[in-house]
Image: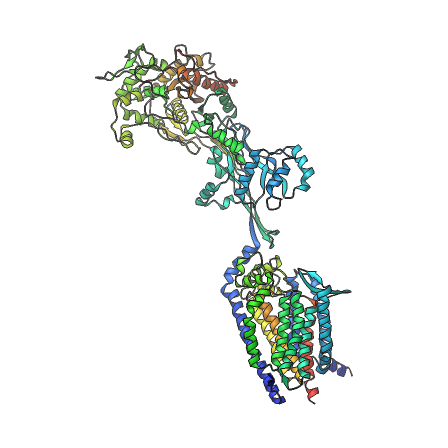
Amino acid sequence: MKKRVSLRNPQQERWDFQFRIKILVGVIAVLCLVLLIRLFWLQVVSYGYYHTLAEANRISIVPVVPNRGNIFDRNGVILANNTPTYTLEINPKESAPVDQVIEQLSHIISITPSDKKLFHKLNEESHGLAPVAIRSRLTEEEIARFSVHRYAFPGVNVESRLIRNYPLAEATSHVVGYISRINQNDLDRLDDEDKLDAYRGTNHIGKLGIEAHYESLLHGTTGSEQVETDSSGHGVRTLSYSAPVAGTDLYLTIDAKLQLAAEKAFGDHRGALVAIDPKTGEILAFVSQPGFDTNLFVDGIDQEHWTELNDSPNKPLNDRALRGQYPPGSTIKPLMALLALNSGVRNADTKISDPGYYALPGSTHHYRDWRPQGHGLVDMFLSIVQSCDTYYYSLANQLGIDRMHDFFNHFGFGKKTGIDLDGEVSGLYPSTAWKRKRYHQDWYTGETVISGIGQGYILVTPLQLANAIATFANHGVMMRPHLLKSMRNPQNNTLTAIQPEVVATIPESDEHFNIIRDAMVAVMKPGGTAAIAGAKAGYLIAGKTGTAQVIGVKQGQKYNAGQTSEFHRDHALFVAFAPADAPKIAVAVLVENGGHGGSTAAPIARQVMDNYLLGLPTTAIKDDTQAKDTTDQEASHD
Amino acid sequence: MIKKLLDRFIKPLDPTLLNTSLILMLIGLVVLYSASGMDMIKTIGQVKNLLIALLLMWVLASISPNTIQKLALPIYIFSLVLLVAVALFGEVSHGARRWLHIGPLHLQPSEFMKIALPLMLASYFDKRGKDRYWLDFVLAAVLLIMPVLLVVKQPDLGTALLIASSGLYVIVLAGLSWRVLITLMIGALASLPLVWHILHDYQKQRILTLIDPTKDPLGAGYHTLQSMIAVGSGGILGKGWLHGTQSHLDFLPEHSTDFIFAVFGEEFGLVGELLFLSLMLVVIVRGFFIAIEGSTPFARLIAGTLSMTLFTYTFVNMGMVSGILPVVGVPLPFLSYGGTSLVTLFISIGILMSVHHHRQLVKQ
């Protein structure tokens, strides 16, 4: 192929050259158009999109986490605060493979299997994006040891962090509660409440008790720092800074000294105690035994401790004071008596004859009194002092369940007290309407009879019982029980006190209260069911014992504590207030499977009152459930 | 006397080319000051580069195209030798062997080839006379392929393609038959799969991420995405001089060299870009006019080719920054920082001026 490209003529050559130049100019024009369309698309059509991207690219908002508010008792004793601790943290992004690092670290610093488990759990949750603690609460010596070897551990650092600390952990576990790491449920809830932004950067949230209920106060307000960043996310300069507002310091109505005294008085017994200032509704002590170490939860509890707490037959995680529901037993007798006077069904002098049982007219069924031989002729005073069951069986029958239901409702039975804690249960006080609704059944008279001595369907929480006795002590003025006494604004340091709140006033003549109070004072004296616990008291105590049946005792059988397994024994109850003529403290005590109110529950209440009113120390009560024959026995029967 | 001297000095300088270039260069310095993070030393450095470049421009404008043509072969051979030297002794940086250290000089010989190859080819076609045989084009292709292969090997695919394109412009302008040209283009398209096969992985990645830069925003798509954000967020009027956040905060890579147009687009917006492009087109179109007036085939070929190459650089760089072309290391004429590219640019302009200044001289 010897084809010639013919370009002989210079003129033609020029013409051809010009033509080719024109073609190239055409190409240029097309390409310029493409470029212009592209630039127009970028800068005009998509301007908003890229503008947003550019802003997001350069500005990052870094949350500044506020310090959590402290919690104090009424006298300023620390119940929860933030203490600096040293934590050994691994940043998986910068370190060697974590298992290898942990293995090497364990030669220098003690790392338990549960530390490892917890680390892996937290590391999984953080998706390897943040440093995770392998050991917290390092000692000075451990820090020193690590410092010597730190060159060998890139990505491993000792960090000083504020960690929540509960000095009275076990004694205040249920009332103060605890904070723990925010989990997915918390995040979902915060999202629902539109508070997710307020928790940016915060790792912990209140899970229980005051820590949970007053979360919004304790948490404070997260601040923020607008940081201009370069491409690697490093801050170049701060554009704006809004300081965080520390959480509010809370002063509780709890008296730490009293709380500890109560905890000690319980010894190894399970149970609950609530002490209230009847004038104000301030909760002085709020104990559920056994407690648990809330500090374990702060940085995530390990499996071992969790299993131990969760599987324990003593159920330390149960808040018995707030959520435990028990039959009140004979502790309701003073209120029954008050209703009798109030309704005019009986007066103080009305006497009934007690042969040791009560039988409904036309029935052969015997509702037994705790004293098989009976109390003889019994008036109201004696019925309380000796806790005569027969008196109240017949009284209940006379009153009828619905009248009782309405009256007890006034005293807070069957409904929440409205205490400032989450998860309170309402208990139960039955009525004919309730039974029809609940069981689609008619109410039986026999059910009214046993309700007279606090058995049957009635269930109360120790808190409700304490609230009821405080209301009684306050002559019918019911204050809202509360735990928050005052709060300190972290910005201006001003203290705001919580005002007592009257929930209800139960119209009743003072005379009626005094009659019953006198009988309750006699309960604590020789001849009364709590005489032992009341002995040599330096002030007047008004009290009432009670026993709540855990298992039913069949007609004709005798309950024998010694032959019953521990968890089937009766619960012991006791309510009291003191000084009887000018009450400063009202107490309700429940000892699970404690047997008799007079011998186990009453001594705990006595010690707590002694401690509060006289400043006396307490000792653990003895286990008396083996005692077979005591004068204060008052088992109930159905 | 003085007027005569001044005339002699000024006359070769085409006022259109000179003024437009100086305006563009001024814009370039203003943008560079911003892009370098208000680095006065860097900006002054570029002014020094500019002075050297202007001197070279003047020298080239003063000598005739015929003289330049005589230098074509030596320059071509010299550049080719340097490229071979790079392949043998070049400094490796970022995985590529592109630079040569000779004493205090820090040279990138592939840049010289951008001028040397068109000079060589234009001179070659001029010498072959008016009758051109297909064999001429084959030989021209050989002259073209040698340096291109050496640059591909560095590896620097972008520069290789630019050098190849400048050579092709000469061949096209020299009168390669349209049929052959179209056949070649079809052939090139057909061989794309083969080319794809010999591409380095990173080069494949660049082309793939060009199709969708968001697929690999932190890797290969990062540069494109960041420059698109910079340009796009500039809007119509731009964020204003020194107020481009993307470039100043280090999001943009190479923001004073290959990606300087992103800084420009961010700070001066669409309006600024239109101004820049218009000025560039003034230079390019002026170059084409000069080419048409050229006295010899060599003068015409080299002027047309250099103008077209100037546009190619501009288009490829702006296309890369705005995300329609893959990221290749191509400086933007007048704006990008760097001595070699600035000198090459003003040599091109000097040659254009020379062609213009000596058009009548030869005619006469």
Residue B326 appearing in the image: no
Image coords of residue A516 (percent x, y): 36, 17
Q: Where is residue B106 drawn, in percent x and y? A: 73, 65
Q: x, y percentage for residue B97? A: 69, 63
Residue sitting nearer the eye, A314 or A446? A314
As displayed, is residue B127 above or below residue A423?
below
- Of the 4 image quadrants, the one containing the C terminus of chain B is bottom right
Drawn side of residue A394 relative to residue B20, left or right: left
Scheme of image coloration: rainbow
Q: How many marks can you see?
A: 0
> Which one is nearer the viewer's eye here, A538 or A544?
A544
Whether residue A608 sits left or right of residue B109 in the image: it is left
Name the residue at the left extreme. A362
Q: Nearer the viewer, residue A604 or A638?
A: A638
Q: Quadrant of the N terminus of chain B?
A: bottom right
Residue A320: give x, y in percent of width and height: 43, 27
Q: Which of the 4 quarters of the picture holds residue A432?
A: top left
* Residue A148 to residue B18: above or below: above
Whether residue B343 is visible here, answered yes or no, is yes
Vertical comparison of A80 with A550: above or below:
below
Looking at this view, name the residue that lies furthest to the front.
A1
